[in-house]
Image: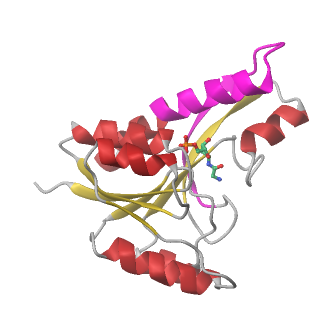
Amino acid sequence: MSKIKLAILASGSGSNAEAIMKWAATSDLAEVVCVGCNKKAAMVISRAEIFNIPKFTVLKRKKETRESFDERMTKSLSEYKPDWIILAGYMRLLTEDFLKHFKYQVINIHPSLLPMFPGLDGYGDAFKAGVLESGCTVHYVDAGLDSGEIIDQCKFPLIPGESFEDFKRRGLAIENKFYPEVLEKFFKGFV
Ligand code: GAR
């Protein structure tokens, strides 16, 4: 049986992208066919190189509309014929045309227990709000802000007295384990 083709999109460090590439490297279910990035010199690019995965960058042009940017991103991604687009710290909202092109087969991880704390700084907003429990959410992507249907969530308590940096580091490490586990279950049809 042929493997499910995953394209990863990321904007930064790419620790989640790396965790997914590591999982896929030994999976008989899925393979990562490319890593796309919207930032120059993002660390995710060197992580893709280590795994020998084709990578490309699409940079926003001055005054470019979201529609035009996503059209160029769609073109670059389409060369690899992905079945699913996996967002891993990709910090842009996607247009309806992009989602339609990929048949709404787009998944993201967000650093909060959605619908709480959508947006750019899930951990920061949860920490500032003084919550006792936080977590991360794997969800379908729609054209809204972290508003797509939830696939699975992982909760973890805040440790009393923990600094924000430690909380975020712990959260990211949990994401790195959780995201590939959810994808494995998702593509097997278990979640
Ligand atoms: C992760 O915490 C991810 O959940 C978050 O960005 C970080 C990327 O880290 N994504 C969002 O906030 C999306 N709204 P990484 O580059 O090391 O994977």
Q: Is residue 188 left or right of residue 110?
A: left
Q: Residue 27's quadrant in the figure? A: top left
Camera-side residue: 132 or 98? Answer: 98
Camera-side residue: 189 or 75? Answer: 75
Residue at point 78% right, 47% down? Answer: 117
The single residue placed furthest to the left in the displayed view is 1
Place of residue 140 in the rendered image (x, y in percent of width and height, measured from the top left): 53, 58
Residue at point 69% right, 85% down? Answer: 63
Classify 51 as above or below 7: above
Residue at point 33% right, 76% down? Answer: 78
Place of residue 185 in the rendered image (x, y in percent of width and height, measured from the top left): 36, 40
The image quadrant in which ligand 1 is located: top right
Is the N terminus in the top left, top right, bottom left or bottom right quadrant? bottom left
Q: Which residues are magenta?
A: 148-177
Place of residue 38 in the rendered image (x, y in percent of width and height, measured from the top left): 53, 64
Classify 88 as above or below 59: above
Q: Is residue 153 magenta?
A: yes
Classify 135 as above or below 12: above
Classify 83 as above or below 74: above
Q: Is residue 187 visible?
A: yes
